[in-house]
Amino acid sequence: MSRVRLVGVGPGHPGLATVQAVEAVKEADVIRNCDGCGAGLLHLAPANADIAPLESVDEVIRLARNGRKVTVLFPGNPYAFTNGSEMADRLHRAGIDFEAVPGLIVELAAPVMSGIPLTIEGLSASIGFGLVTGGETVVLRLASGWWESGISALLQNGRAPETPAALILNPGLPGQHRVTAQLSELARKATTYGLRGDALLVLGPGVEMAERLDTLSQRPLHSRRILITRARHQVDSFRRELVDLGAAVVEIPTIEIRRLPTDDRVKEAIKNLNRTVFVIFASANAVEIFFQMLLTTGADARALYYSKLCAIGQETADALVAHGLRPELVTSEYTAEGLANALEGWELNGRRVLVPRAEVARDALPSLLANRGAEVDILPVYRAVCPPDAGPALMRLFEGEGVDVITFTASSTVSNFVRAFPEDRLPAILGDAEVACMGPVTADTARKLGLPVSIVAREYTTHGLVTAIAEAAARK
């Protein structure tokens, strides 16, 4: 593998990154990204990868000379509308082994996503990028505040005022939005809608086909901006479902999972599994980390042979199944109280019960088990902390564009979110954003902390939460 990879991540939609781009992220020791691009791919990076914004070519050269495998992410294509070629030239002159990984540019991707063919047999056989006089189809990037100037320049270059044209907002992202009109009327129409920001201007015969071919705008969450606060390593399927329904996803994790050391207490608990009747997992994180600890001590899944396995919630059960173990009991209600009710027919008196869980968690479960006479061993296996950059990122988000829906999948994500804001500003700064929670415990926490909860999933999984958000959008 080359020591440095200059990687185009495509137009922004994580699903439009190439297989080579994904591999470059997975194999890197160091990842540097330009202008925040590739955020939807960073969860694929190794856990110990050094990830940060790109500072300079000198840093990349230094890291490469120190033996690090460096991946530099560029929006679109590293050799198109970026400084990737300049970096490549510097790397060549420094004697650094490198390769460029091409990516899809937004000028090609966004029109297709909005149902605009760029070439049509018999009508358009050429494409021009930028302020060009040729090209039956023209695609032009316009920065915020320069829409009218770009349109005026095209008219002055001889484009007919009645030419079919479209402005695409948030181009290349799942939530991109299209406005169509004749070229001379386009800026006025967009202003009427109150639209602003960077955009892609497309003109040509393909624009007239957009109303028929634009499947993106027909999706139930199209143009809805949805915030995910879940831990970064758990967002992939959640994000993918939201994106498939047309949402524009913003990811600011308010929780980070840190595994606790495999200390003497952990080793003792694993050693005593042969006399532990029940092992109750309260989260998928507890499952994953407990199994890592098993391997660390030289044990494996066979150590659980003598124990009945219980899972709180379907996602926790799925995590056990992924390790080849099917739990004897899965509570459909994502609460400790729900599990206690489900255990009602099980004999617990005098039985040893192990509960691997977070370091700080609600005490309802051990109390309920102890009341049934169980010998309860609470085993903290991870610590849930708030990432240091979450607070500033949330303030920037809500002082700017904000979002339409804020999602919470656990009480800790809510608590850390609320702490990011001055208490007296919280209701006002959230604006009209709806609060969506994965279950009643999380919803109760949100309400107690002053958040108006309007969406609660009936099924306590991220799939159930996506379904609830889509149903709420359909009612509007």
Image (tube, grey):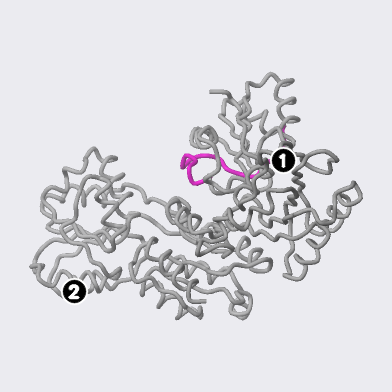
The residue that label 2 is drawn on is: 341
Q: Quadrant of residue 196?
A: bottom right
Please tell me the numbered disc located at residue 124.
1
Of 40 and 427, nearer the camera is 40
Kind of residue indicated by mark 1: Ser
Residue 257 location in percent, x, y?
43, 54
Callout 2: 10 Å neighbours few (<14), some, many (20+)? few
In the rendered view, would you say 386 is above or below 338?
A: above
260 displayed left or right of 231: left
420 displayed left or right of 189: left
Residue 401 location in percent, x, y?
66, 66
Tell us which disc is closer to us: 1 or 2.
1
274 displayed left or right of 382: left
115 displayed left or right of 122: left
Residue 281 location in percent, x, y?
26, 59
Of 406 and 414, nearer the camera is 406
**Mark nearer the N terminus (1 vs 2):** 1
Asked whether the beta carbons under mark 1 and mark 2 sit within 8 Å of each other, the answer is no
Residue, far top:
95
Kind of residue indicated by mark 2: Asn
Residue at figure coordinates x 82%, y 38% from the top left: 134
In the rendered view, would you say 464 is above or below 3?
A: below
* Element under disc 2: helix
Of 106 and 100, nearer the camera is 106
* Element under disc 1: loop
Q: CA distance from mark 1 to mark 2?
A: 67 Å
Which region is colored magenta?
42-57
* Magenta-drawn stretch contains 200: no
Please tell me the numbered disc located at residue 145.
none
